[in-house]
Amino acid sequence: MSRVTIDIEDTIAYVRLTRPEKHNGVDLQMIDELNAAGRSLKANKKIRAVIIHGEGPSFCAGLDVKSVLSKPARAALAFLALFKPTANRFQNMCLVWRGLSVPVIAAIHGNCFGAGLQLALGADIRLATPDARLSVMEAKWGLVPDMAGTVLLRDVVGKDVALDLTFSARVISGQEALALGLVTRVESDPLGAARALVEEICTRSPDAVAAAKHLFGQAWGASDHGALAAERRWQRRMFVSKNQRIASARNTGQGDKPFGERQW
């Protein structure tokens, strides 16, 4: 049975975790299906945004340890991935969303623990219910975050906050996560709010949105020199974009032509 489904409505892709009876606990099959979903959507130039959400009572309660260990041979192979010199499939499950040229929004409700939190951190924007429960939970199992958590946490919170959450493995509410910067906004209906946000984003040039995502990805940790060079490089591409001309015409009252397919 599938662990992940992709539904495309107009230009919005909904990636849904479908193990509600397990609070969408992550097993090896789900890891592979999330990686495949990310790769397939990366190749789709017709979509304008991706919304990741969970079916049932939770977004994702983390790694389903019992399920993973129930298949010793596969578990042993998974352990060997820790010796790879490059990112493994566990890490790519959360990182793959960064490579998409469209906004990725995580709609969080219920439990969002461990692997689930790292998956949410791989999104560009996180919307959570005020009473959602979030945790960097690996220390509870005597482990450390290893699904790109170190890379993803440093982009959203300070080192002291990341260490506080990691050392303690404490569970925090969506409201506290907002105060710490772990989520972007709290919403009573994060899936509906994600849909409304995407509708607003879709009024902008798809090339400008894609370029902004890649620009900030390149510039955020770069030196001033590197960040400014990235700005110039991406802006040059904007000025030769057909969608930029359509956006200009719209804003000057000289046309209302729909945007075309994004360039990258």
Image (cartoon, rainbow, N blue to C red):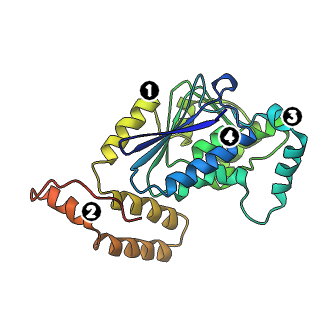
Label 2 to label 4, Cα distance in Å? Answer: 36 Å
Evaluate if marks 4 and 1 touch, with contact meaning CB atoms under 8 Å apart: no
Q: Which residue is mark 1?
A: 189
Looking at the image, residue 114 lies above or below residue 57: below
Of the numbered discs 1 and 2, the one sitting upstream in the chain is 1
Q: Is residue 253 left or right of residue 172?
A: left
User: Which element type, helix, strand or loop, lies under badge 2?
Assistant: helix
Quarter of the image for residue 59 reads top right
**Residue 113 x %, y %:** 68, 34
Nearer to us of marks 4 and 1 is 4
User: Which element type, helix, strand or loop, lies under badge 4?
Assistant: helix
Nearer to us of marks 1 and 2 is 2
Q: Is residue 143 left or right of residue 35?
A: right
**Residue type at tag 2:** Asn
For the residue carrying disc 3, how many other residues have a C-alpha within 10 Å: few (<14), some (14-19), or many (20+)?
Answer: few
Quarter of the rendering occupied by the N terminus? top right
* Mark sitting on residue 255: none
User: Which element type, helix, strand or loop, lies under badge 3?
Assistant: loop
**Residue type at tag 4:** Met
Label 3 to label 1, Cα distance in Å? Answer: 36 Å
For the residue carrying disc 4, how many other residues have a C-alpha within 10 Å: few (<14), some (14-19), or many (20+)?
Answer: many
